[in-house]
Image (cartoon, rainbow, N blue to C red):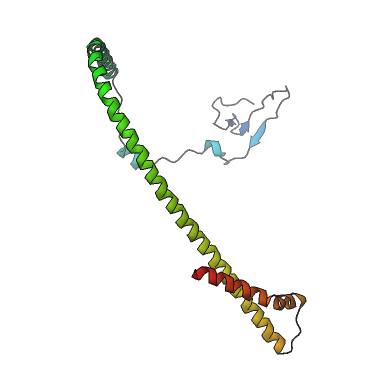
Amino acid sequence: MSSNKNPTLSGIVTTDDNERVIPATRRPDGTLRKERRVRQGFVPQEDIARYKNPWVEETTPPPPQKKPEVLKKKSQKKNVKRNLRKKEREKEGSLGSIDNENQQVVEEDSLGQLQSKISDMSINKDHESLTSAKENTTTITIEQLETTTKKIKALEKKIRQIERIKDKQSRGESLKLEEEEKVNKLEQFQEELRKLKQGNEE
């Protein structure tokens, strides 16, 4: 059985008898894989050609290619710029020794200015700390109000439930142990509610 030497991407080879076969191969451990026949008309996933849209291929221009000469010019420009910067720094360094005397005079003047700025900042900090303390107290009072209103609502709800249980009891229905315990706590809940409402009014 001689075979065609042009295998597909999946490794299928067509023999002279016009049969399609995956040829025998050797495994890494040395054993042989048998030759396998592929039925006529079967096309494995690897051999299916990818769809190419001809219209898109015609309309998209090829990417521009840069010429090597242009790249050399850019790198040369960079080198020239670097050299200019170095020369400017060297000139500044020689002028820097002359400017040192002038800087000392300016530094003495700026010390007084800095001290005045620092004292201004410390005054501002005291003012800021007072305002932040006021903000903290307002936030605390807001949080306290929220918690007390929540407690008031919860107590009012419990009292309403107890009143329903009392109505149930007055109709002659039997109460569960939990319901009886709630009825016994009615006075306690009403007292707590009165205290919270008085605290809110103050």
Q: Which residue is drawn at the image coordinates 26% and 11% (left, top)?
A: 93
**In-image side of 200 versus 83 (left or right):** right
> Which quadrant holds residue 138?
bottom left
Q: Which residue is drawn at the image coordinates 62% and 74% (left, top)?
A: 191
Q: Position of residue 58 (x, y in %)?
A: 32, 38
Q: Position of residue 92 (x, y in %)?
A: 24, 14
Q: Which residue is drawn at the image coordinates 76% and 78% (left, top)?
A: 176
User: In the rendered image of this protein, does residue 145 appear above or below residue 44?
Assistant: below
Q: Which residue is drawn at the image coordinates 65% and 82% (left, top)?
A: 164
Q: Position of residue 59 (x, y in %)?
A: 30, 39
> Which quadrant holds residue 110?
top left
Q: Can residue 62 be seen?
A: no
User: In the rendered image of this protein, does residue 12 appear above or below residue 83?
Assistant: below
User: In the rendered image of this protein, does residue 11 appear above or below residue 94?
Assistant: below
Q: Position of residue 77 (x, y in %)?
A: 25, 17
Count up the numbered dots.
Answer: 0
Q: Quadrant of the N terminus?
A: top right
**In-image side of 188 versus 48 (left or right):** right
Q: Can residue 184 be seen?
A: yes
Which residue occupies the extreme bottom position in the image? Answer: 171
**In-image side of 25 versus 67 (left or right):** right
